[in-house]
Image (spheres, rainbow, N blue to C red):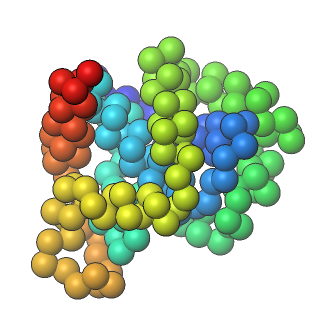
Amino acid sequence: MINDLNIKDVAVYIGLSSVTKGLSISPLKLQKLLYYAQAWFMVFNGRESTLFCDVPQAWVNGPVYPVIYYAYKDKAANMCDHLDSYAFYDGDALEGLQKISDKLSLDTEQQELLESVVMMYGKLSQNQLIWLTHSEQPWADARSGLAPYERSEREISLDTMHDYYLARHTRNKQKT
């Protein structure tokens, strides 16, 4: 099952969900939350399943979806100030969240996954998320051979993402 959700709409959902929970959401942090949403979606739905068709690139500060980078690169650190440019948000984040959820036609499992990602990773600072992604195999493999501050547009393998997080999930389940 390949979902063809619009990554920009998923980004708005994640941004509004974060706002409703009182969590900060910078453009850089948004990138990491999208990355983890894609990774965990594949874990729970199989490698052939993706939440959206975009593939992250291994940039210096971690996984980046270029389309989201260019959409948000000039925005303030906290996304609240520009979410009102979307028809979904009229200052009421909960109402906006419901509207974007309806537009995306999220099923219960998809919505629960996105909410779980926001709750688990959204509590971390953007610097903690950079460190976390740098310590994980998918980004590290894609950056292999590059200097720490060398620019790159190398894609992070969806196969590696799936396998790495599935193995992590399996290890965690065995501990409980």
The picture places residue 165, in percent across and down from the top left corner, at: 24, 40
Q: Residue at x 23, y 46 (%)?
A: 161
Q: Is residue 88 visible?
A: no
Above or below, 44 against 79 in this view is: above
- Quarter holding the N terminus? top left
Residue 136 in percent (x, y) is at 25, 56
Q: Residue at x 28, y 82 (%)?
A: 148
Query: Where in the figure is residue 150, as x and y percent of width and height?
Result: 29, 84
| Front-lying residue, 140 or 120 | 120
| Nearer to me, 104 or 127 | 127
Q: Is residue 6 above or below residue 27?
A: above
Left of 167 or right of it: where is 130?
right
Q: Is residue 175 above or below residue 75?
A: above
Q: Quadrant of residue 27?
A: bottom right
Between 123 and 58, the residue placed more toward the observer is 123
**Residue at the limit of the structure toward the right, as seen here:** 91
Report whether 38 appears left or right of 145: right
Give the quadrant of the C terminus.
Answer: top left
On the image, the x and y values in percent for residue 112 come to 50, 22
